[in-house]
Image (cartoon, grey):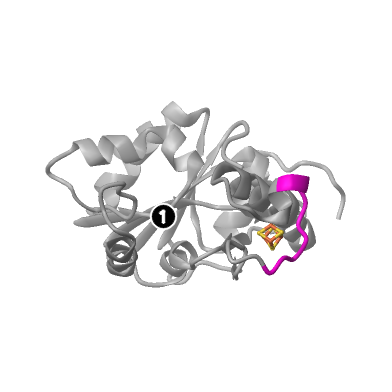
């Protein structure tokens, strides 16, 4: 496959053919507007939770949900909670009605590819929450699975290790060394070929580069 970048419209067509609901946003503000005006009323969610995503946070959706006292949230990130409590909340998050996060790569033929340290993010994306919303920058679109793996190993994961100040080899070199570090952030892969049931997962594609 050529290295030509897919347009957001082409990416939407490929994802839609695989059963995902897809929205295109001009920018993070528009993504937030789409979420609150179109997605949230449609999913009629009760309990909401999330997994780490810089792109999702850039939209402001999470901050607005947390500020709304009428929405019940499972706080999977909470500096005041102990590690054991956080892990328990992440287990509970898999039973949320609505689960929000991002995605490491989207292929030209509409597959979603992710890599996790713990697995709570890809766990929720795969099964459990009734509905899932993924916020994805245009920079995450890649030609094929091979490019997705390369992008994640040699860009997203090293940058993520640097962001968290983890002492992994990639945090020094910017490339994957398939390490045995106790802080290895690459442990569990997920590839969503198609959405089952159709429409369970909604993808908000955002014009521009966001996240890692
Ligand atoms: S396997 Fe290790 S070196 Fe490779 S990206 Fe993950 S944490 Fe970094």
Where residue 156 appears, x then y in whole percent? 65, 49
Residue that label 1 marks: 51
Magenta residue span: 172-180
Ligand 1: image quarter: bottom right
Q: Quadrant of residue 51?
A: bottom left
Residue 128 shows in this picture: yes
Where residue 135 appears, x then y in whole percent? 48, 45
Q: Quadrant of the N terminus?
A: bottom right
Where residue 147 appears, x then y in whole percent? 78, 56
Where residue 57 appears, x then y in whole percent? 42, 38
- As drawn, is 188 to the left or to the right of 68? right
- As drawn, is 4 to the left or to the right of 57? right
Q: Residue at x 44, y 59 (%)?
A: 201
Q: Residue at x 36, y 32 (%)?
A: 33
Q: Residue at x 49, y 65 (%)?
A: 122
Q: Residues within 10 Å of mark 1 (few under 14, many from 20)?
A: many
């Amino acid at each position: 496959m050529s290295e030509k970048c897919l347009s957001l419209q082409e990416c939407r067509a490929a994802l839609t053919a695989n059963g995902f609901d897809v929205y295109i946003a001009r920018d993070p503000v528009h993504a937030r507007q789409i979420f609150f005006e179109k997605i949230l009323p449609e999913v009629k969610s009760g309990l909401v939770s999330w997994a780490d995503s810089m792109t999702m946070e850039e939209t402001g959706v999470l901050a607005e949900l947390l500020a709304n006292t009428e929405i019940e949230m499972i706080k999977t990130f909470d500096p005041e909670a102990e590690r054991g409590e956080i892990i328990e909340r992440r287990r509970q998050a898999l039973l949320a009605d609505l689960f929000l996060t991002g995605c490491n790569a989207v292929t030209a033929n509409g597959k979603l590819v992710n890599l996790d340290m713990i697995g709570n993010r890809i766990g929720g994306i795969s099964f459990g929450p009734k509905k899932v919303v993924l916020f994805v920058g245009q920079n995450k679109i890649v030609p094929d699975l091979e490019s997705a793996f390369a992008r994640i190993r040699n860009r997203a994961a090293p940058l993520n290790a640097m962001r968290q100040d983890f002492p992994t080899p990639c945090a020094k070199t910017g490339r994957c060394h398939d390490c045995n570090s106790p802080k290895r952030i690459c442990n569990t892969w997920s590839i969503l070929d198609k959405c089952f049931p159709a429409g369970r997962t909604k993808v908000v594609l955002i014009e521009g580069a966001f996240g890692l």
